Image (tube, grey):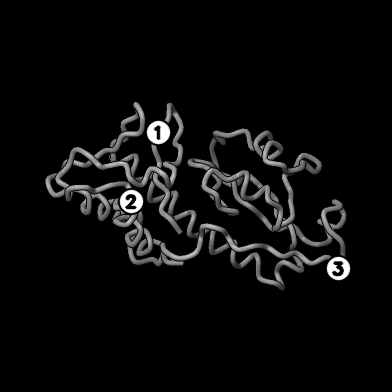
């Protein structure tokens, strides 16, 4: 799983595209030619250690910071006119987002076990965390091809909406920076009642297209 790198655009965080891997890091005592690709490679094993329970959030953030500086001065990168400092806020977003993606992936794998799929062929997108949700998920859901069922965002587990609704290209949470949305399984009984599938219909969920390998998976 490739490490997600954020950059702040206005009041929101957005993802640095994979095509940005060649962008150089600046402003610190780094090896010549150090780029965002190298930054991902530095961060990946440290996040993996965190997700395996070998380091907490604060320790992981300190380890990433230590790997990026030898004199206390952290680097930055620029995309267009936007300069992104690799400060404490940025490090917190990196650690939380990538940790949550690993946890989401593990839950995704469990939920696509054949026996689980037979009993629970669908999922519902729900808000599970306290606080104001920064995105209009119902609008986003419909624009991504999803259907609303009695005010609820429910789709089969093999529906492409799960990939389309994500800012990260993963069919599992988190779907965006700072979002409190998650998924809960929907039983076959309810899925049949909603007209999503039949009693004997099989659901075949494709593997996450960008989740294999890395980050302790």
Question: What residue is disc 1 on?
Answer: 8
Mark 3 or mark 2: which is in front?
Answer: 2
Q: Residue at x 29, y 53 (%)?
A: 38
Question: What residue is disc 3 on?
Answer: 200
Q: Position of residue 22 (x, y in %)?
A: 33, 45
Q: Residues within 10 Å of mark 1 (few under 14, many from 20)?
A: some
Question: What residue is disc 2 on?
Answer: 37
Local SS, label 3: loop
Q: Earlier in the sequence, mark 1 or mark 3?
A: 1
Q: Residue at x 25, y 42 (%)?
A: 25
Q: Earlier in the sequence, mark 1 or mark 2?
A: 1
Q: Locate residue 133 relative to residue 147 in the image: left or right.
A: left
* Structural distance between the alpha carbons of marks 1 and 2: 19 Å
Q: Residue at x 46, y 37 (%)?
A: 14
Q: Residues within 10 Å of mark 3 (few under 14, many from 20)?
A: few
Q: Position of residue 115 (x, y in %)?
A: 72, 73
């Amino acid at each position: 799983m490739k490490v997600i790198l954020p950059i702040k655009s206005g009041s929101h965080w957005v993802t640095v595209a994979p095509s940005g891997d060649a962008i150089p890091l600046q402003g610190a005592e780094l090896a010549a030619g150090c780029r965002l690709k190298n930054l991902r490679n530095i961060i990946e094993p440290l996040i993996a250690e965190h997700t395996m329970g070998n380091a907490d959030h604060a320790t992981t953030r300190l380890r990433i910071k230590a790997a990026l500086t030898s004199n206390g001065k952290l680097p930055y990168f620029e995309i267009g006119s936007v300069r992104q400092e690799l400060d404490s806020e940025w490090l917190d977003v990196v650690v939380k987002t990538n940790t949550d993606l690993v946890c989401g992936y593990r839950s995704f794998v469990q939920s696509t076990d054949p026996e689980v799929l037979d009993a629970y062929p669908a999922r519902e997108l729900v808000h599970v965390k306290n606080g104001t949700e920064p995105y209009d998920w119902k609008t986003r859901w419909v624009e991504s091809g999803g259907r609303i069922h009695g005010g609820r965002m429910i789709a089969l587990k093999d529906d492409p909406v799960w990939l389309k609704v994500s800012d990260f290209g993963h069919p599992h949470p988190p779907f965006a920076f700072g979002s409190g949305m998650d998924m809960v399984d929907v039983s076959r009984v309810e899925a049949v009642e909603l007209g999503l599938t039949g009693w004997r219909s099989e659901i075949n969920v494709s593997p996450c297209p960008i989740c294999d390998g890395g980050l302790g998976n």
